[in-house]
Image (cartoon, coloured by chain):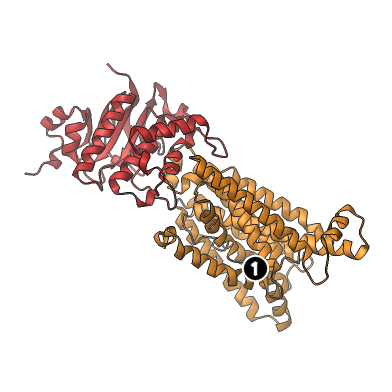
Chain colours: A red, B orange
Amino acid sequence: MPNAILEAKDFSAGYTRALFAPVDLSLFEGELVSLVGPNGVGKSTLLKSFAGILDPWSGKLTLCGMPMESFTMRKRAQTIASVFTQERVPYGMSVREFISLGRIPYSGFLDARTEEDEAAIDEAIASIQLEKFADRSVLNLSDGERSRVLIARAIAAQPKVLLFDEPTAFLDVPNILNLFRILKKMASERNLSVLLSTQHVDYALRFSDRIIGFDGKGFVREATPQEMNESGFLGWSRVE
Amino acid sequence: MPSNSKSAARIWGGFLFLGIFAAILFLLTILSGPSSVGVSDVIQAFLGKSDVVVNDIVWQIRLPKACAALLTGISLAISGLVLQSVFKNPLAGPFVLGVSSGANLGVALVLLAGFGGSIGVFPCAACGAFGVVLLVLFASKFVAHSVSLLIVGLMLGYFVDAIVSFLMATSSSEALRGFMTWGLGSFSRLSLDAVPTFFAVTVVGVILCGVCVRYLNAAQVGDSFAQSLGVNVRLSRMAVLFGASLLAAGATVCCGPISFIGLASPHIAYGIFKSSNHRVLLPASALVGTELALLSGLVPGIPLASVTSLFGAPIVLWIFLRSKRGGERA
């Protein structure tokens, strides 16, 4: 049995009210977990709570066996890397500079990069084969290329957990397949726990080790793709 | 982030060039003026060996002027860069937070309404500038989004400008003339005694912005991204905004409302270094700003505010039209 990296007990998330009934969830080493549910049920909010950006509405979060609150912001950011959809693509930034932002959890006041940082950036670039566009501007990337650059930026932080909000939103079919393959490879090779939210339920069921599903009526459940598919919990995603 | 030797060479070469250019302009500012002063005169004046007249010209007129231009350039450029990054808006600058308007109001109260005449123009301008800054910072406690804060600053600026217009409409033509002269801007108003104060304000402002490089770099992608990287966004944003306001207020109070240096310097610095890392951009913008200010000060006979606009507007346009980045941003 692999170790649980992130655990949630009686957990619910929300800004002004609980968006779903309290639930126990956990993320294990080396697995790819997909978060599926209709819009507005709290997928992004759940991710924000897991990322430590938003306090949980209720319940407790445990990271590597310790309460989330006991982590400093810096230590937390070194353990959990996250990519959110509302991110703005900065102008005039090269791919390498952009990936280098992922090392900010390790940098000092003046945001210098040590040789160790540069090595981690090089390694992240190499692991997703981005060498040939490292000097290009992030603004000029296609959606597929950008999604890979975002993974590299998260990987550069050498995290234990990778949270990814709607990475498949603007991708075509080959790029969605590629993205899932890369994330799955990252999870197993690095013993990384990957949690991504997506509207592409079919791909999620095919590639994920486990699913955290929203039923659209305020309930959340975690299960294997097969169990999830058979239980009818994701009834909202069926085309009749 | 010097990713390879090529960009590292570009960065060091760029700083060397800008540094030497700034030093030459600084010296030129000390040398040029109505009465001719040579390099040897300047050296002797610094050694305390020259005659009284030359000594006075160098120490009381030329040096304060050169320092005023140097510090104003640094202040406005860093203030502009930081505001552009925090508000994620390439058109942001020291004017948008209402800082200049606040300083204007302080001066208008003294020169037009005769209020607080015993305190003097500079302290009143400083009070006006900081009054607006405090209001904007106070608002930032309640406003989560940087763009909303930009609107708060703009609206405050308009509001304050309206009060100034009212004061102008109701004042005598003589008072109005004095006020307009202040508005034209000048590096020559700073006295030698005031240089250390201006210097101290600039240093504090630069430090406040400088310790937030992590935030400034991450904020280009977004505040919540910065937060996910473990950066204390609220604290950093407060520090950076306070620093930027301090810098803008210092420059405006000492030299008048000077446009374009704050807006143009970061764009020129980016054009030279092709880096969006604030470790590079902060010192680079400061150097470019200094050079723009010293150059503007060297143009004789035209009011400072006009010079910066006359040269600044075409430069900004040129950069925007020339660079691909400009096309994408517009």
Q: Quadrant of the C terminus of chain B?
A: bottom left
Q: In this view, does A11 lie to the left or right of B111?
A: left
Identity, as a three-letter code, of the amino acid under mark 1: Asn
Is residue A10 shown above or below B86?
A: above
Q: Can residue B97 be seen in this view?
A: no
Residue shown at the point (50%, 44%) measured from the top left: B6
Q: Quadrant of residue B41?
A: bottom right
Depth order, front residue of B2/A175:
B2
Residue name at image x 73 percent, y 53 percent: B199
Work out whether B193 lies above or below B161. above
Q: Which chain carries label 1?
A: B
Of all residues, the one furthest to the top in this rendering is: A1
| For residue A234, above or below residue B108 | above
Percent across and percent down for residue A146 are: 33, 45
**Residue marked by disc 1:** B104
* Residue A73 x %, y %: 48, 33
